[in-house]
Image: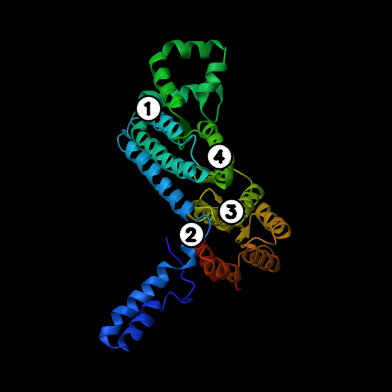
Amino acid sequence: MTFSMSWLDDRAIAPKLLQDRLQEVPPERSILLFLFVLWLGLASPVWFQPGFAAQIAGDAQTDSAVREFENYLGTLDPAQKRSILAARQEFLNKFSASQPKVRADGFRSFLAFYGNVVQRCDADFLRKKDLQRVLHLLADETGSKGNPLSALAKSRTPVASELKAKYQRELAELQEYTESGIDFKSSEGDWYLQEDACFLLELTTSLSGEYHDYMRFRIQESQQRVVEDAALQVSWDDLGRKIARWERFAAEHPSLPEAKTTMEPQIERMMSWYLVGVDNTPAYDFSKGGTIDPRLFQSYGKFVRQNSRSRHFVLISGIYESLKKSQCRINKQVLDLLKSAGYQNQRLERNAARLFATVPQ
């Protein structure tokens, strides 16, 4: 923690200034001068401001409680899914009566541990071919695009009953993952593990303030897959609206650490998708002369009209206006705008270079 000193406005030059002044006085007086300056610092009014001691005590309480909780987490095996339940219970026991800031910091520690366990278990889950096979069978039977266990439990078809009877061991093991707060997702022909949104949502009731708002926002947004199997899973309009929502939330919560550490990188990732596309959903069709996807072009127009306060407004409006002048075909100005903003894509640039070599700009 930094303590301000009202008698020195420029703390950056304070050490040099003090050194210069000490060199100008006789040695026998320099110690007296130093002690006097030290006394002034200790006597600064900041020490006696209302709430200052309480703030220090609160910070100490946060550090102590979180440190104890993290020490406990260190005793758990991150390779065991049941460790999540033990961590959750310890969090509730330790922080249920804590101040909001203490509770939020404790939850951050829990969340990091939770994510680590899911990641460790996921690395092993791909090798469990029996569970992978059963999940494929359940998904085929129920038609579920998410976790098929809940859909199977509700199904009363003869095939569902046969699956329940035939794969009791595998279903019991899969149920252990679900009970431990782990969800399943399918991607590129395999099944993977991920955080369970419902499991987290239940825990957020113990939070308050802007961190509570952030967790609710994060959980709500996670319900919509954006890119899967190198293809866009939402419309261009939905992606543009999602970017705008994330921007607004981050701007409305500037003191929230996650606004910069978590949200900003994701916003940039989504902007890259919005501006250059992904492998199986390209932004420009070079088989048609580098023409932008008409739906994306229309989406740019909507974004410009609806989000004039967006920090990406100038970039998107510049690209939109440039494309209007070139009959919706990519041009050098659009590439320059993308490069200057840091959204470079080698495949797009190679295709554009071949196009420009045959079509004068």
| Label 2, residues with CA under 10 Å away: few <14, some 14-19, many ≥20 | few
Q: Residue at x 54, y 42 (%)?
A: 215
Question: Could you tell me if residue 127 is visible in this image?
Answer: yes
Tag 2–tag 3 contact (CB < 8 Å): no
Q: For the view shown, which residue lies furthest in the left direction?
A: 27
Q: Tell me the SS state at disc 2.
A: helix
Q: Nearer the viewer, mark 2 or mark 1?
A: 1
What residue would you read off at disc 3?
Answer: 253
In the picture, the quarter occupied by the C terminus is bottom right
Q: Residue at x 46, y 49 (%)?
A: 58
What residue would you read off at disc 1?
Answer: 82
| Label 1, residues with CA under 10 Å away: few <14, some 14-19, many ≥20 | some
Asked where in the image residue 19 lies, by quadrant, the reply is bottom left
Q: Position of residue 317 (x, y in %)?
A: 67, 65
Query: In whole angstroms, how far apart are the C-alphas of marks 4 and 1?
Result: 22 Å
Q: For the view shown, which residue lies furthest in the right direction?
A: 305
For residue 219, the mark is 4
Residue nearest the viewer, comparing 122 with 353: 122
Q: Position of residue 201 (x, y in %)?
A: 55, 34
Between disc 2 and disc 1, whose residue precedes? 1
Q: Position of residue 237 (x, y in %)?
A: 67, 49
Against 225, residue 253 (above or below) is below
Residue nearest the viewer, comparing 193 with 28: 28
Between disc 4 and disc 1, whose residue precedes? 1
Query: In whole angstroms, how far apart are the C-alphas of marks 1 and 3?
Result: 34 Å
What residue would you read off at disc 2?
Answer: 347
Between disc 4 and disc 2, whose residue precedes? 4
Against 267, residue 215 (above or below) is above
